[in-house]
Image: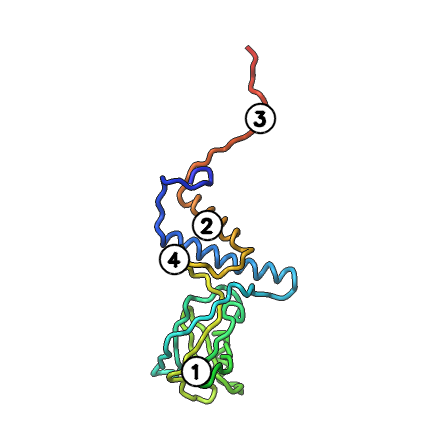
Amino acid sequence: MANQFPNDDWVITPNEMLLYINEAMSSGIIGQVYSGAKILGAMEMPEAYIVQFELSALTQDTISGKWTTTLPQPPLSLPLGYSVNRVYPANASLGQGQDVILLKAKRVGRRKNMPLQFGVYGEIQNKKLILWASNGTPLLNEVFYVEMPSTRAVNLTDAMPLPDDAAEMIFNKVVARLSNRLQIPHDVIQDGLPAGNKTS
């Protein structure tokens, strides 16, 4: 880049470019959510960011008896309901099941001593989703789906899950990071400067 325009003199790996894109998308989503909260008095998640993923097969922890699977990415730094929109089971014969009741990790311990609504409960630890049924029913062979905002671009040619009005913001953030990372000198043109000293 020379004076904010690309040329052939710089080299950057696709992984580094994807890192900057993912960073810009995640900070852009969080910024839009909290910006909307300031205006409307209630948090809103732009729907264009939300993507549905099929989760990998459940495995049972032999000690706790709970079931675990892996999310496609760690959730964003947003409250539940925004970082993870919803989790639910579904299959071809019965269709879509009841949504998982997601609990904040710090409240899981207290919930064990309280009356539980019937259903499947879940907690999130980084990329790990932990599930258990309120009545102890095994979840073997159940297929779960998650809807959550996706900030992970896997290559530089795929379409990204972002609303049109955010595209310029993401682009500008990535260009700024690249300019700073590569320490590229910029030409500064200042028009309208007064004439220099001409006394002889």
Q: Is residue 63 left or right of residue 116?
A: left
Circles 4, 3 touching at the beta carbon (< 8 Å): no
Circles 4, 2 touching at the beta carbon (< 8 Å): no
Circles 4, 1 touching at the beta carbon (< 8 Å): no
Q: Position of residue 97 (x, y in %)?
A: 49, 82
The residue singled out by tag 4 in the image is 155
Q: Residue at x 40, y 87 (%)?
A: 138
Give the SS element for disc 4. Answer: loop
The residue singled out by tag 2 in the image is 174
What is the C-alpha distance between the residues marked 4 and 2?
15 Å
The quadrant of the rendering that contains the N terminus is top left
What is the C-alpha distance between the residues marked 4 and 3?
46 Å
What is the C-alpha distance between the residues marked 4 and 1?
32 Å
Which residue type carries mark 3? Answer: Leu
The quadrant of the rendering that contains the C terminus is top right
What is the C-alpha distance between the residues marked 3 and 2?
33 Å
What is the C-alpha distance between the residues marked 1 and 3?
73 Å
Of mark 4 and mark 1, the one earlier in the sequence is 1
Number of numbered callouts drawn? 4
Residue 89 against residue 195 in the figure, above or below: below
Which residue type carries mark 1? Answer: Ala
Of mark 1 and mark 3, the one earlier in the sequence is 1
Residue 116 against residue 164 in the figure, above or below: below
The residue singled out by tag 3 in the image is 193
Examine the image and state in which quarter residue 192 appears.
Answer: top right
